[in-house]
Image (spheres, rainbow, N blue to C red):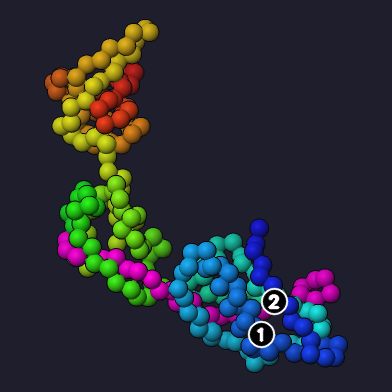
């Protein structure tokens, strides 16, 4: 359901009046302010086609900016503004604006190798414009806790969530307990992990570190459970 911010335009006198540019600006600014109120996002609005006046509307007419599905309030945007009077929309026009966003930017201080724990990554932090950064740009190191790099990251590159993945519980060479269930009997034996994996993932293991590689589901950091072989 679209969220609509309404600003009542009360007439100074007479049956109707013109909508002035300042009133349109106020409606748009309040709409953006409401959208960013919860996140506390810093922003600046630059209007591009704000008319000096739009049309004559009834005394109790009001302007409403409509948030359409998929609308992103960042960069160049077209905002639909409706004139609502006498119980219905009497006119719709578009306001073109550029919404610049600002915030904390994190970059890699030096080259980051693939699969490096985020705890070992040296990060630079600065404040600046974020308008053209990827939507998943990282602005707080807390978002990287428990993660590792998915690929090589160049020195100076802006950090994004897509560059990282959850650190696996198990890595190749880890010793674990392999649980084998068959005919209501549970057997536990030692095994060596041959693939990285997180909780619930399927990894290859070897009993005692030798023999055939078997598929097992990761239960926790010390345990895997054999998957029925077909």
Asked if residue 198 is positioned above or below residue 159 in the image, the reply reads above
Label 2 sits on a secondary structure element that is strand
Q: Residue at x 24, y 67 (%)?
A: 124
Task: Classify mark 1: residues with Cα within 10 Å, few (<14), some (14-19) or many (20+).
Answer: some
Q: Percent position (x, y) of residue 181?
A: 33, 13
Task: Classify mark 2: residues with Cα within 10 Å, few (<14), some (14-19) or many (20+).
Answer: some
Identify the image quadrant of residue 131. bottom left
Q: Percent position (x, y) of residue 120?
A: 19, 53
Count of marks, rendered view: 2
* Between 47 and 106, the one nearer to me in the picture: 106
Q: Percent position (x, y) of residue 36?
A: 52, 68
Asked if residue 188 is positioned above or below residue 156 in the image, the reply reads above
Residues rendered magenta in the picture: 84-111
Residue receiving disc 2: 7
Relative horizontal placement of residue 218, taking residue 35 as reference (left or right): left
* Between 123 and 4, the one nearer to me in the picture: 123
* Magenta run includes residue 31: no
């Amino acid at each position: 359901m679209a969220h609509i911010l309404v600003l009542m335009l009360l007439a100074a006198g007479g049956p109707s009046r013109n909508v002035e540019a300042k009133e349109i600006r106020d409606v748009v600014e309040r709409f953006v302010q409401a959208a960013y109120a919860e996140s506390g996002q810093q922003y600046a609005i630059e209007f591009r086609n704000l008319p000096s006046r739009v049309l004559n509307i009834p005394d109790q007419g009001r302007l409403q900016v409509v948030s359409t599905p998929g609308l992103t309030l960042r960069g160049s945007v077209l905002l639909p503004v409706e004139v609502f009077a006498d119980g219905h929309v009497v006119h719709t026009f578009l306001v073109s604006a550029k919404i610049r966003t600002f915030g904390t930017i994190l970059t890699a201080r030096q080259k980051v190798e693939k699969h490096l724990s985020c705890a070992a990554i040296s990060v630079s932090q600065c404040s600046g414009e974020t308008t053209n950064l990827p939507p998943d740009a990282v602005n707080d190191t807390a978002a990287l806790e428990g993660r590792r790099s998915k690929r090589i990251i160049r020195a100076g590159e802006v950090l994004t969530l897509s560059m990282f993945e959850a650190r696996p519980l198990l890595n190749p060479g880890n010793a674990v307990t392999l649980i084998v269930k068959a005919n209501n009997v549970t057997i536990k034996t030692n095994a060596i992990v041959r693939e990285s994996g997180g909780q619930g993932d399927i990894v290859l293991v070897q009993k005692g570190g030798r023999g055939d590689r078997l598929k097992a589901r990761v239960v926790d950091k010390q345990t895997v459970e054999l998957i029925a072989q077909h």
